[in-house]
Image: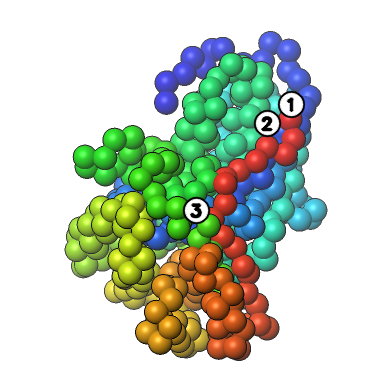
Amino acid sequence: MKEDNEERIFKEVPNGKVGWKSPSNIALVKYWGKKPGQVPANASLSFTLRESVTETTIEFEPASGEGFKLEFFLDGMKNEKFADKTVKYFESISNSFPFIKQLDFKIRSKNSFPHSAGIASSASGMSALALCLCEIERKYFDEFSSDEKFFKRASYFARLGSGSACRSVYGGFVSWGEIEGVRNTSNMFGNKINKNIDSVFDTFQDSILIVDAGEKEVSSSLGHSLMNSNPYSLGRLKQAGENMIKLMEVIKTGDLGGFVKIVESEALSLHAMMMTSNPYFLLMKPNTISIIEKVREYRGETGIQACFTLDAGPNVHLIYPDENKKEVRDFIGSELLKLTVNETVIHDEVGQGPERIAY
Ligand code: PMV
């Protein structure tokens, strides 16, 4: 991103506060594997959630010493791990936001979902943080910047914090990664799919079944790096490219049968990559598999196009059209809840994207 950094230094350093609420997203075509500079090895496509959000506010004041200081509060409690991570992130992008060094920060963040729910809190958290930084910039240096530019820039910097976070800056269906022959696609930021999308997807449902509430067993960065030596990675990249093209067509036509095939295959391919890495990770639990089997059976018996997808963990996202909400929720209650931890399910759906909460 080009910029004139000279102009992004405060002459008079202000006190202030900004805040954004930003959602998580669930990938349908999975990003797995990356090149240096947070460049994805393949293009991915997700939809943004509505209920699973991070709310972040940043209070800032003139720096008390050389460089910046930062405190991080997660759910009201001081969190050193998040503070260290955020310091590293701010340092890594301070050439683009030189005013960072002139400020001290108090960051307060809270998630609407439990930390261990297997919902990508890095996507909601990093997008909220990037939006806040871009908000400070817009407020003092770029007042007249267009919304389009603002969100593109936020997506670019969210990506540098956590790849999939760049998709959370927009609502609805969002792609990330260059796709040959498709305009407006980039490895640098997410791209909201505005046109060519059947209305059935505007209200798609995602019920997240919590099979295991433990900490993540494999960090995303380790997982991505293991793709460099995975013997099947070239085949996987080819498959992901083909699935992107197929999925774009399917969401255009509303072909739910085609949608289910691609989405489930993507989830299993992601896990196949983890199982064939060295060291390997087997992240599905017995109940993950039981739920998958029940979902397939249910679809076979009822013809309702509900399907599963998985992140890099054991919890199952059951996704289905809004018009089947009642039947599918009944099915969850009678067949699936007993396979979750303490009957935990988080009902979510396609959301409209981030919202500003403080200025
Ligand atoms: O954004 P990261 O580095 O946490 O990686 C996310 C990887 C998956 O969630 C498994 C897939 C995706 O595209 O979101």
**Residue designated by label 2:** 68
Q: Nearer the viewer, mark 2 or mark 3?
A: 3
Three-letter code, disc 3: Asp
Give the image location of residue 158, x and y in percent.
Answer: 51, 41
Residue in the image at 39% along x and 49% along y: 197
Towards the viewer: 12 or 254:
254
Three-letter code, disc 1: Ala
Q: Is mark 3 within 8 Å of ligand 1?
A: no
Q: Nearer the viewer, mark 3 or mark 1?
A: 3
Residue in the image at 72% along x and 53% along y: 110
- Determine contact: label 2, label 1, CB under 8 Å: yes
N-term mark: 3 or 1: 1
N-term mark: 2 or 3: 2
Q: CA distance from mark 2 to mark 3?
A: 42 Å
N-term mark: 2 or 1: 1
Towards the viewer: 347 or 156:
347
Horizontally, is 29 left or right of 322 in the view?
Answer: left
95 versus 315 height, above or below:
above
Three-letter code, disc 2: Phe
**Residue designated by label 3:** 202
Q: Quadrant of residue 208?
A: bottom right
Q: Quadrant of residue 223?
A: bottom left
- How crowded is the residue under tag 1: few (<14 C-alpha within 10 Å), some, or many (20+)? some
Give the image location of residue 318, x and y in percent.
Answer: 50, 72
Q: CA distance from mark 3 to mark 1?
A: 45 Å
Q: CA distance from mark 2 to mark 1?
A: 6 Å
Residue in the image at 42% along x and 26% along y: 1
**Residue designated by label 1:** 63
Give the image location of residue 60, x and y in percent.
Answer: 75, 30
Give the image location of residue 296, x and y in percent.
Answer: 39, 83
Q: Report the disc number at residue 305.
A: none
